[in-house]
Image (cartoon, grey):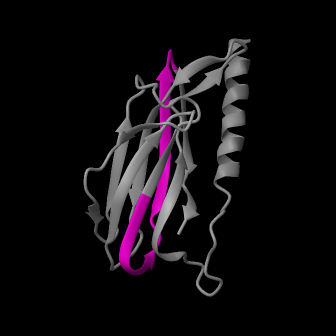
């Protein structure tokens, strides 16, 4: 019975992940590439998901990934803020802006044992550039493993302000 519940939960999470991966950004009809000089991006993150009939929390490690996709121009990450389920700021990750060169990446990692965010945690990432560039890929990867059971999924960022 426990195995069946685990499979059911995993299938639900896979379906939700596929729904989240449906493109929601506006794209240039000419090239199919999203161009911008800067954005504010909301990225869902999960400290845990719930399993079984008792809705027990399954703790997850969360990695926010920010990937520059422009082949020739740099971008600046001006802020990375982490919020909890209630929308309260938990922590700010940058004291000053950081630069990402063409095709460069950076990340923020939150360990499984850090449950401060809860099920509805999120990041707000702000970035800009001196010129119009390919918008970066900003997403969270959640991974957890307990008692031989593992789960992983990706949550893409969504532009909330240009």
- The residue sitting at 35% across, 61% down in the picture is 77
Name the spot of residue 43 as percent of width and height, x first. Answer: 53, 49
Q: Which SS type dominates the magenta stretch?
A: strand
Q: Give the position of the N terminus as an image quadrant.
A: top right
Name the spot of residue 90 as percent of width and height, x first. Answer: 42, 35
Looking at the picture, tell me which residue is in the foreground, 17 or 114: 114
Q: Which residues are magenta?
A: 126-148
- The residue sitting at 55% across, 77% down in the picture is 33
Looking at the picture, tell me which residue is in the foreground, 116 or 138: 116
Question: Which image quadrant is residue 27 in?
Answer: bottom right
Magenta span contains residue 144: yes
Vertical order, 136 against 96 (above or below)? below
Left/right of residue 27 with respect to residue 62 in the rendered view: right
Name the spot of residue 14 as percent of width and height, x first. Answer: 67, 40
Vertical order, 103 against 147 (above or below)? below
Name the spot of residue 144 as percent of width and height, x first. Answer: 49, 28
Looking at the picture, tell me which residue is in the foreground, 50 or 1: 50
Vertical order, 117 against 135 (above or below)? above
Magenta span contains residue 146: yes
């Amino acid at each position: 019975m426990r195995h069946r519940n685990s499979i059911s939960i995993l299938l639900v999470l896979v379906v939700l992940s596929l729904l989240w991966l449906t493109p929601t950004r506006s794209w240039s009809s000419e090239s199919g590439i999203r161009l911008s000089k800067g954005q504010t991006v909301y990225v869902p993150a999960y400290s845990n998901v719930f399993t079984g009939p008792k809705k027990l929390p399954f703790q997850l490690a969360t990695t926010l990934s920010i990937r520059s996709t422009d082949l020739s121009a740099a971008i600046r990450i001006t802020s990375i803020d982490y919020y909890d389920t209630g929308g309260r700021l938990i922590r700010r990750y940058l004291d000053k802006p950081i630069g990402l060169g063409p095709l460069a990446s950076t990340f923020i990692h939150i360990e499984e044992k850090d449950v401060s965010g809860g099920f509805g945690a999120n990041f707000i990432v702000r970035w800009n550039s001196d010129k119009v560039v390919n918008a970066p890929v900003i997403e969270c990867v959640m991974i957890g493993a307990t008692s031989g059971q593992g789960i992983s999924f990706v949550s893409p960022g969504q532009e909330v302000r240009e």
